[in-house]
Amino acid sequence: GAVVSQHPSRVICKSGTSVKIECRSLDFQATTMFWYRQFPKQSLMLMATSNEGSKATYEQGVEKDKFLINHASLTLSTLTVTSAHPEDSSFYICSGQDQETQYFGPGTRLLVL
Amino acid sequence: DQQVKQNSPSLSVQEGRISILNCDYTNSMFDYFLWYKKYPAEGPTFLISISSIKDKNEDGRFTVFLNKSAKHLSLHIVPSQPGDSAVYFCAAQFTGANNLFFGTGTRLTVIP
């Protein structure tokens, strides 16, 4: 199957700083990528849909100014958590769509102190 | 609001026996359902799917059953193997939309 990578896999930062997470499709071109978030004991929840060359579409309740998404190429989407706070601590996972199947990255665990 | 639910957080099965993982959903407009398997430190990988026009889809040891009237689907793995030990997520989708609605997952342990 297709491969999606994420970097970093784990990040710890101070409150108020910004964190950038990269999502790359390694062996396919993903015109659409998705960003999910998972809090402990909860399901993966879609945050936003990222389309190459256009603005991301955010789900209700997700602040677009706080979670900046850039999808500058067919193989790279980035999620920047701006002015991170402890409540942003979570597991962030991206996926790339190849034809009709979503392929997931391994995820990034963010801890904001 | 959790639209897709997996009420069993864990399941243990002896090797060679059948594993049955269950999933319920609340939105009758969902028309495509998927199962993903997730190993530690890896992302979910697609396993099997079923369209709402079917009630069964089989792929090797994996079979998914859909009961639309009960808004219930299940994944059967037979025979279960130790390598099947993982967290299994069910997900649901609307036609024409890319958004996946996930359950909270069930951790399957297959005991050798």
Image (cartoon, rainbow, N blue to C red):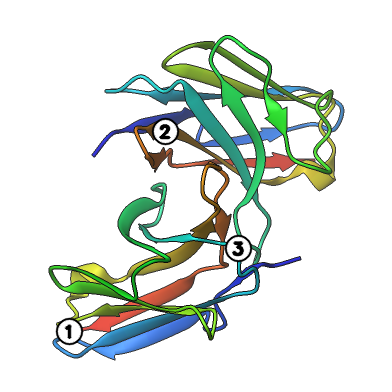
How packed mark 3 is, by other alpha carbons closer than 10 Å (few <14, some 14-19, many 20 or more), is few
Q: Quadrant of the N terminus of chain A?
A: top left
Q: Residues within 10 Å of mark 2 (few under 14, many from 20)?
A: many
**Quarter where residue B12 is shown:** bottom left
Q: Which residue is found at the position 33% from the left and 52% from the top?
A: B46
| x then y, percent, for residue B111 | 24, 85
Q: Secondary structure at mark 3?
A: loop
Tell whether label 1 touches label 3 (CB within 8 Å).
no
Q: Residue at coordinates 43% horizontally, 38% vertically from top-left? A: A105
**Chain designation of label 3:** B
User: Which residue is the site of mark 1?
Assistant: B112
Q: CA distance from mark 3 to mark 2?
A: 22 Å
Depth check: give the residue in front, A55 or A16.
A55
Could you tell me which secondary element the residue under label 1 belongs to? loop
Q: CA distance from mark 3 to mark 1?
A: 40 Å
Q: Which residue is mark 3?
A: B29
User: Which label was assigned to residue A31?
Assistant: none
Under mark 3, the amino acid is Met
Mark in the foreground, 3 or 1: 3
Q: Quadrant of the C terminus of chain A?
A: top right
Placement of B62 over or under A57, stated as above or below: below
Taking the spot 56% from the left edge, 21% from the top edge, the residue there is A51
Instruction: Give the letter of the chain under mark 1.
Output: B
Between the C-alphas of marks 2 and 1, the distance is 36 Å
Instruction: Say what amino acid the circle numbered 2 marks.
Output: Gln
Q: Nearer the viewer, residue A56 or A17?
A: A56
Identify the residue under disc 2: A97
Q: Position of residue B31 (x, y in %)?
A: 49, 60
Residues tagged by mark 3 and mark 1 found on one chain of the structure = yes
